[in-house]
Amino acid sequence: GRRTHTIACESIVNCAGMWARQLGEKAGVTIPNQAAEHYYLVTDTMPEVQKSWPVVEDPSSYAYIRPEADGLLVGLFEPQAAAWNVPANHFSFGDISPDWDRMAPFLEKAMGRVPSTMEVGARKFFCGPESFTPDLNPVLGEVPELRNYFVAAGMNSIGILTAGGVGRLMARWVATGAPDMDVTAMNVDRFHRYQANPEYRSHRVVESLGLVYKPHYPSYSKQTARGVKRSPFYERQRAAGAYFRDVSGWESPGWFDDSPPPADGSAKPAPRIEKLSWGKESFFPFWAREHAACREQAALIDMSFMSKFLVQGRDSAAGRLLNRLSTAEVTKKDTITYTQWLNAAGRLEADLTVTRLPDRSPGTEEDRYLVIATDTMHRHVETLLTRAVEDDLAQFGSVSVTDVTGGLAQLNIQGPNARTVMQELTSCDMSDAAFPFRACRELDVGYGRVTASRITYVGELGYELYIPAEFALHVHDRVLAAGAKHGLRQAGLYALGSLRMEKAYRDYGHDMDNTDSLLEVGLGFTCDFTKEGGFVGQKAVEAQRTLGVKGLRKRLVQVLLKDPEPLLYHAEPLYRDGVCVGDIRAASYGHTLGGAVGLAMVEDPSRCPVSAKYLQAAEQWEVDVAGRRYPAQVSLRPLYDP
């Protein structure tokens, strides 16, 4: 019979490749990779082939071609794949019966790239399993479910190419407990449990393999495994012309088509992007109007996709624990606080807000907090919280963490007219004196009760409303009705992105990552160095702080193109007097500023300090956009700062 053995070890790394998901399931670990059929043909002998020839890739033919034995191998990444072995059965070192009818047109086109391959016989037409992840990024790191259980899988058919880098990264991660490279897009904790469902995997892998050789247009949103995670406002938004994007599985409006209906009285077609590109696309005017509405009047933005955790304790345990995690002082009553969480080395782990919620009964002292984090860091933040609770039970006492993301809808009302709109919605006093910046109150809106915080992520007067799901539609409709006469417009995530980028507001996982320090990204103002008990990573922050500007060899800066036509997205090189000193980490179009705007991490090759003087001393700043350099303005301070 089968014998089992137990091996005691400090850490385990799941490198089981295609079988990583099944192995992980045995330990209750979520790894949502899925196998698909992968095809290649090996020709008979071709005397002219040399083993030193490189791999040739032709995405337009969905093909790669390389020497194999004494012939050529023609491999395929067809635009629509076929999932394989979804209800997993035992399989190893075998072939899958090829689907000739489906693959023949792709194979013929690929072999047409090298016509001589069609003049010799085929030694083998092979179909075997190859696994892919839902977002085509690797699955790396320590899993949320089990300490010291690491994963290095999900290489999406480029395991040999990435093996050296992944191996080095994982060795450091296991040995030290923290990665020394940006892993925000690769960390295993970005995935949710539902993404390992068989139906989700089988639908998404068809698209994932097909995207290997397709252009990754910036406005493209995954099309498969969609339409299930919806905020309560989905149908209202669809009727208003929303174009939905996949936001961590949520259906969230990217923009709203506000064009008039056809003159002939026919139904208005569903909004769409006419042609994917890297230029100004068909929705650009809609986006511009939403942006302007927020700057000049008011905008309503659905942010229900944000991760929300209710943290509660006894005898101030929750507040003391959160205060220890947070760089800022977060225990002030009825107050929302923008803060960061760091690791012991002073590197960023999370960028979020912590709100001490109003007491539900007069005269009580409740220990309730709402932690709000970006959607992509949901399980990362949840894991930081739950592990802090486990580790610090003896120090802080009993604390509970509850994921309330689906139970609380979130609407943001932002813009100069936001207070006027809010005052029409509630009997509570919304004046600046009664409801100052960072205040949090429970309000009446119609029949509903909402938690409102005065905070902004766009650089204007604004409020965030957290609404129990059962009241969400009622409150939504009341907001639109009250805002109609004050220029309130529904806005999507493109407007949110351009508004926050003009103000140089940060977003962890996009323009900040786990390799950055608090001072390098310009968020030192969030630190309270005098609060009781301090915060995680404080010694490291103070050590860098004592060095002053001399200790800042790299810094996050805002970049604005002076030419209004080109757009910025990500990874465009930034030049200072002809020398590359960084690249654009995240960007949008500044409709108010009049050009593409982004955030870049500047690090001079000479390792000199990056100061305001360093920026001003440059004769010319430029950004390379598609091979052409454009003049740019660079600043440590927000270029939009009303």
Image: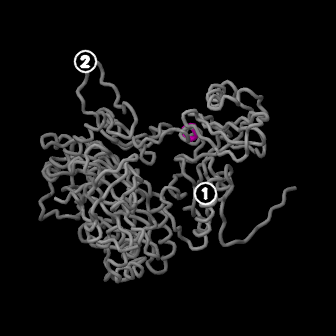
* Residue 408 visible: yes
Q: Main secondary structure of the magenta part?
A: helix
Q: Is residue 226 left or right of residue 373?
A: right
Task: Identify residue type, mark 1.
Answer: Val
The residue at the point 47 percent across, 42 percent down is 216
Furthest toward the top, the residue is 264
| Membership of 149 in magenta stretch | no
**Image-quadrant location for residue 127:** top right
The residue under label 1 is: 29
Q: Secondary structure at mark 1?
A: loop
The residue under label 2 is: 265
Furthest toward the front, the residue is 48
> In the rendered image of this protein, does residue 510 appear above or below residue 260?
below
The mark nearer the N terminus, 2 or 1, is 1
The residue at the point 65 percent across, 63 percent down is 13
State the extent of the magenta-drawn residues as a range. 204-209
Residue 511: x percent and y percent? 38, 59
